Image: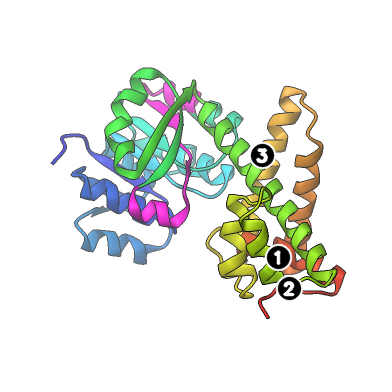
Amino acid sequence: MSATRAGFIGLGKMGRPMALNIHKAGFPLTVANRSQAVVADLASHGATAAATPAEVAAHADLICLCLPMPAHVEEVVLGPNGVIEGIRPGAIVVDFSTIGPSTCRLVAERLKAKGAQYIDAPVSGGTTGAVAGTLTVMVGGDQDAYDRALPLLQSVGRKIVHAGPVGAGAVVKLMNQLLVAINLAGAAEAMVLGTKAGVDPTLLYETIASATGNSFQMARNFPDLILKGKFDPMFSVNLLHKDVALAVDVGREQHVRLLLSALVQQIFAEARDAGHGDEDIAAVIRPLEKLAGTEVRAR
């Protein structure tokens, strides 16, 4: 068992399997979450339950976060009974959340005043990768903090990349999310148009899948989701819309023109506002299907 104690806050679809893998790797683990059922579940696997983020921080050298929104990170770290109230000098917050680099830098500065460090470490690979421990982890932070956290990061990820200072990991993740959204929106338009023009959608997909227009988003979203009319959320429209909005904010800060990014932000807002926000990102196709009067479904 490792002498380094870990904590984990945010035991959702990604956080729970990541926390389990950290525990299986031999790190003594203390956990907290708004939903107490999942805390009890982790406790049944040998983790220690905590009532507040401050309590987690008081018992951990590496405090992991996996939270949906920047506001949640600020609340959990800096709010009442937050991590900052329990953290000890020398501890490191390892933030697996997908948030903007400005939030990363704000939290890092506040923790620095307490003698603690912060690294942003957003992940890619979905729930399958979280369960298997094969995520890609994109890290921003000081070299020393990265080196100390690396054994824990290796328990959740297969490819660990140190991208630069605090905020750099967040930038890499947001650029990935921009491409996810742009590729998916483009694939949705092509598949709706081809189907509307009279081509069987399964034939259309299978042909593109063996041609130069193929992409990871085609493979992820069409054969098992869109073509079958299944939109149960693995990763929701709401969350990808949030990620694109954060990426567009980075573009604004850096004075970089982002035409496609701004447009795809509107496309995902359209799906959200049409009532598909809690569905899987594959549901971004549904407003266009409605407008076109056709559905991309296996026949």
Give how far apart the Cα atoms at labels 2 and 1 are.
6 Å
Precedes in sequence: disc 3 or disc 1: 1
Residue 82, given in percent of the width and then of the height, sits at 42, 41
- Kindly identify which residue carries mark 1: 204
Q: Mark 1 packing: few (<14 Cα in 10 Å), some, or many (20+)?
A: some
Q: Secondary structure at mark 2?
A: loop
Region of the chain picked out in magenta, as a range: 108-133
Q: Is residue 296 above or below residue 219?
A: below
- Kindly identify which residue carries mark 3: 246
Please check the rendered image and state whether residue 125 is part of the magenta-colored stretch, yes or no: yes
Asked which quadrant contains residue 3, the reply is: top left
Whether pointer 2 and pointer 1 mark residues with C-beta atoms closer than 8 Å, the reply is: yes
What's under tag 2, amino acid-wise? Asp
Q: Is residue 277 visible?
A: no
What's under tag 1, amino acid-wise? Leu
Quadrant into which the C terminus falls = bottom right
Q: Is residue 170 left or right of residue 66?
A: right
Name the one closer to the observer, 290 or 89.
Answer: 290
The mark lying in front, picked from 3 and 1, is: 1
Q: Is residue 133 above or below residue 274?
A: above
